[in-house]
Amino acid sequence: MLKHLVLTSALCISLTACAQEADKKLDVTPKPEPTPISAEIGMKGEGWRKISPENLVLMDTKYGQIVIELNPEFAPGHVKRFQDMVKARAYNGQEFYRVIDGFVAQGGINTIDKKWPPIEIEVEQPLGDGTNIQLLGNDDLFAPEVGFQNGFAVGLDREIDKKWLLHCPGALAMARDSDPNTGGTDFYIVLDAQRYLDRNLTVFGRVISGMQYVQKLQRGDKDIASGVIQAPQKGDQIISAKLASELEPNEQPNYEVMHTDTPAFMNKINSKRVQSDPFFFNTPPQVVDVCDMDVPTELVDF
């Protein structure tokens, strides 16, 4: 186990990555090409898509199960690394060792392991035609435009032809040091929106169920060792993490997500944007924050 380091920057949020400064050799394995998220129609109908079992992570804690959808379209290398570590059971028995209220819950192997060298950061992908991105429809403080693609909150810039995933609550991202290419093992889940981190750390998934269990995790003191939980206290354990694809077909949970490039989801955005209830004697402005939009997700029985 590494000696805990006192970190001076909010961006330096991985003890593993900080230690890896001494060994900058990147994983030279060819990075997989971005692959679109499966558009398989869900059992709920054409307005819903089934999450592919290989992109569905089931992470058990003493509070309950955290369910994560990975996004290989935006961060294929990070998704592949996370899948490989999950299948190797590298996270089983490890801890959420740095949890800061209103910031992030960080966990991982918390040590140097040459089996898992750092990987190249992946913060943007080409925008392309952007036809399946549902734009939010009002200004954003952090990006020229924002919206949703396949249920994930995204930012985009047409001038540079780029899109990226956002640090909204529930986002799963890879921790790193000040060098962009020092992450690869330890991850964090965003507890409250941290949009200033967008395009600076790799977001590669999101929690689709069990966020209430993430919020129960043992906290550290943000003013001591940058929030790393100090002995004799210990961070809550990751009892196990596995991919749904590792289960027998009849045991795989069937999670489905509402398509976000549809009039039905745009209606949900507009219903949150326009607050016309008589309760409001001072009418709120007709704007909505991209991180305040919940994308409907359901566990569907076969």
Image (cartoon, grey):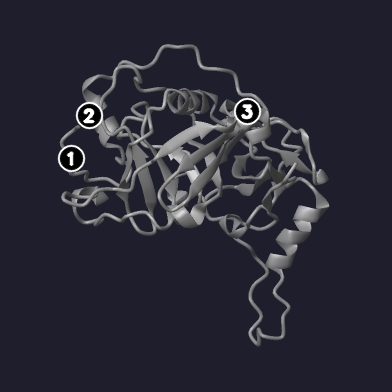
Q: Nearer the viewer, residue 85 or 295?
A: 85
What's under tag 2, amino acid-wise?
Ala
Viewer-proximal residue among 86 and 73: 86
Check if mark 1's residue and mark 2's residue have beta carbons within 8 Å.
yes
Q: Is residue 39 visible?
A: yes
> Is label 1 in a helix, a strand or a loop?
loop
Residue 202 is at least partly visible in this image: no
Q: Quadrant of residue 52?
A: top right
Element type at marker 3? loop
- What's the residue at 48%, 27% (across, down)? 78
Question: Closer to the N terminus: mark 3 or mark 2?
Answer: 2
Question: How many numbered discs sit on the rendered protein?
Answer: 3
Which residue is drawn at the image coordinates 37% and 37% (left, top)? Answer: 175
**Which residue position is annotated with label 3?**
248
Q: Can you identify the residue that label 2 sits on?
A: 19
Q: Residue 126 appears at what percent x and percent y?
A: 62, 29
